[in-house]
Image (cartoon, coloured by chain):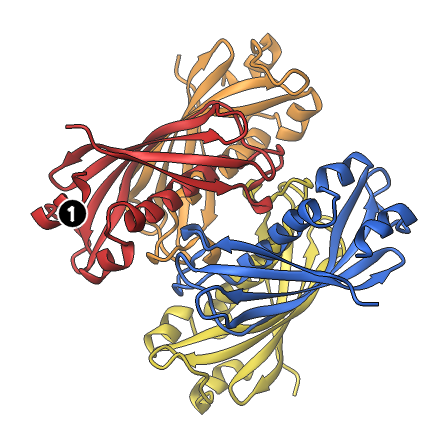
Chain colours: A orange, B yellow, C blue, D red
Amino acid sequence: MEYSRFETEMQVRPDDIDMNQHVHNSRYFDYVLAARYDQMEKHYGFPMEKFLAHKFAWVISKAIIEYKRPLGLGDHFVVNTGIKEMLPKGCIVSFHINSKKTGKLCCDGEFYYTMISMETGRGETIPEWIREHYSI
Amino acid sequence: MEYSRFETEMQVRPDDIDMNQHVHNSRYFDYVLAARYDQMEKHYGFPMEKFLAHKFAWVISKAIIEYKRPLGLGDHFVVNTGIKEMLPKGCIVSFHINSKKTGKLCCDGEFYYTMISMETGRGETIPEWIREHYSI
Amino acid sequence: MEYSRFETEMQVRPDDIDMNQHVHNSRYFDYVLAARYDQMEKHYGFPMEKFLAHKFAWVISKAIIEYKRPLGLGDHFVVNTGIKEMLPKGCIVSFHINSKKTGKLCCDGEFYYTMISMETGRGETIPEWIREHYSI
Amino acid sequence: MEYSRFETEMQVRPDDIDMNQHVHNSRYFDYVLAARYDQMEKHYGFPMEKFLAHKFAWVISKAIIEYKRPLGLGDHFVVNTGIKEMLPKGCIVSFHINSKKTGKLCCDGEFYYTMISMETGRGETIPEWIREHYSI
């Protein structure tokens, strides 16, 4: 199955820049996180707040990021994400971040998410009604 | 003299939220910094890049922030800043951050900036041509 | 009344450094926060965890920081903090951060803390038994 | 060839904690970065400052992190890193972070580093004298 992909536009903040004058490596991670929050609300019709209200949370069990070209101060960029694969207790989200100005790829990778119950802290089989929200 | 005030709209990122479920205190500082960068380019016609090219930099010598109401996950907000007073070697910028949804004040305060020469690291008297850029 | 002052030693992390090759202004804020947590446990005999267990939290209502000399990559430093004044619903904590290598002052300032009930979110008069913990 | 492994002890800072009450995912990345800086100086006899003085820099081209157990407020932890493989223009560093209290694994993974010339911004074949520093 092919899942839909969504885009979120953002801008580099000065506090994202590190001593090498580029966006600090770990901040790309935060950009993807921000884009998923945004897209859960706008595109999946399932904002994080509603998700948390059901005592579920997404935790990241694995992250892979490949860095291609750095972003710099004030750069605008597009975070493209989408589900690559649904798993019984989670999903794999793939992403790529492109510079708005040049269109070129800055980094790409995958986040492995596990859905946990906030009451037990353990991974849970994703209920069908939640699965449907993501199956677009 | 009354100086112009400018506004920059931003959104809280998930990585700005701390263990108290609100924007972390020190991040408001970064929001003001980001707004000034934005406004230097858009409104003062004097982007930071050009400033740095002249081997000048702004450093903050004093910051005062009063916290009124916290921002939360995903909140949109407006950072209003403007010069309160020009000094021989710097300026005082006052700011206030308001929630976009409620319009209410989240925090306000002042940053004291000193202009330094990047070559000597010392405070410099602001040249007239730079002063004019800010005298709007 | 004179209150005791306490010291916490820390080291600059690479991710604290910003594009100016110095510790980012807002990170000093985090250093003071970290020192207070440390000192609540070690010196006030009152770790934050216990405080939270009583459904109380400290929120910062005002912060003043004066920057004197920047810290750089890998620098060791000492955060000295102490209560300057106890207020009915909070306290004023003064701090100064000194470089370990040079002994020189990097920044100093004050944080105004308000004690809130986590249930109501409102400021609370500090109970006598908590006040005693800090009256050293 | 088997390369030496080194350990750096650190403590979680309050600003590392995110809305889930655990260390924010991207901060583990920063912990590894901090440990490598520390170990370059203490164990490889080759502090980053000296490296930069030769107009070389390490950039991360790929990062893989697997999250096992979260760290919490105030936790002490040990970052164990070592070279897994030397490449013509870089190296693969593997790491694991363990809680000091429980000894249990918090996360592990690999960083792919590329050595670049700061003058050209391009990857460089690692000179023999630098390679020797790391071949311990």
Relative vertical location of residue B61 with respect to residue C43 in this rendering, above or below = below
Q: Tell me the element at label 1.
A: loop
Q: Measuring from the top left, give residue A22's x and y in whole percent.
A: 35, 54
Q: Chain of mark 1?
A: D
Q: Measuring from the top left, give residue B99's x and y in whole percent.
A: 70, 52
Q: Which residue is mark 1?
A: D123
Q: Measuring from the top left, give residue A90's x and y in whole percent.
A: 50, 16
Q: Residue at x 53, y 67 (%)?
A: C98
* Quadrant in which the N terminus of chain A appears: top left
Q: Amino acid at mark 1?
A: Gly
Q: Is residue C22 left or right of residue B84?
A: left
- Given residues D8 and C68, the one toward you in this image is D8
Relative vertical location of residue B50 with respect to residue A40 in this rendering, above or below = below
Q: Is residue A69 visible?
A: yes
Q: Is residue D65 visible?
A: no
Q: Measuring from the top left, give residue B117's x and y in whole percent.
A: 39, 81
- Given residues C9 and D36, the one toward you in this image is C9
Give the crowd class for mark 1: few <14, some 14-19, many >=20 residues within 10 Å. some
Q: Is residue C89 left or right of residue B127?
A: right
Relative vertical location of residue D82 with respect to residue C38 in this rendering, above or below = above
Q: Residue at x 49, y 86 (%)?
A: B131
Taking the view exactly as shown, the residue that stands out farthest to the left is D128
Total marks placed: 1
Relative vertical location of residue A85 with respect to residue D99 in this rendering, above or below = above
Q: Residue at x 62, y 29 (%)?
A: A48
Q: Residue at x 33, y 44 (%)?
A: D36
